[in-house]
Image (tube, rainbow, N blue to C red):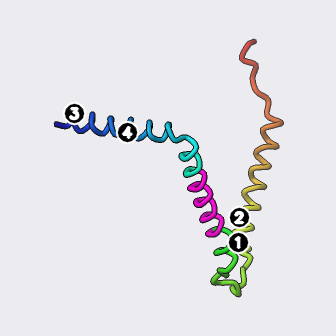
């Protein structure tokens, strides 16, 4: 019974594809209009609607976190020191 349902769906799919292929220009126009509609909706959503909406916390002042900044600077300095130390280290020649 499942095979019959699969064959029937497969047959319907082939008939639908043949219908679209026989009316290629009409299919092209429908797909073009659908893509223009979808593109227009996306443009409206991300262009016009975002321009009208304002951020909620626009008056909140941002604060500089000195502790975090100092931690980043310390990490950069320690990495730079390790990088400089790697340049002066001499390795043994493994082929002698």
Q: Are marks 4 and 3 in contact (CB under 8 Å)?
A: no
- Dot 3 or dot 2, earlier in sequence: 3
Q: Is residue 34 magenta?
A: yes
Q: Report if residue 18 lies within the magenta region.
A: no
Dot 4 falls on a residue whose secondary structure is: helix
Report the Cα–Cα distance between label 4 and label 3.
15 Å
At a point 72% along the width and 57% down the height, the residue shown is 75
State whether residue 66 is above or below residue 59.
Answer: above
> Residue 13: where, in percent of width, then height?
37, 39
Give the number of marks.
Answer: 4
Q: Quadrant location of residue 12?
A: top left
Marked residue nearer the N-terminal end (4 or 3): 3
Q: Which residue occupies the foreground of this view, 46 or 27? A: 27
Residue under label 4, please give it.
13
Q: Nearer the viewer, mark 1 or mark 3?
A: 3
The residues colored magenta run: 32-45
Give the vertical position of 59 relative to 12 (above or below).
below
């Amino acid at each position: 019974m499942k095979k019959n349902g699969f064959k029937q769906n497969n047959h319907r799919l082939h008939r639908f594809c043949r219908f679209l292929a026989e009316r290629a220009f009409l299919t092209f126009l429908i797909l073009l209009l659908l893509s223009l509609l979808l593109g227009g909706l996306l443009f409206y959503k991300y262009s016009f609607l975002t321009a009208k909406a304002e951020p909620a916390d626009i008056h909140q002042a941002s604060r500089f976190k000195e502790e975090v900044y100092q931690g980043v600077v310390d990490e950069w300095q320690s990495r730079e020191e390790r990088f400089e130390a790697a340049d002066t280290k001499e390795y043994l020649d493994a082929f002698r």
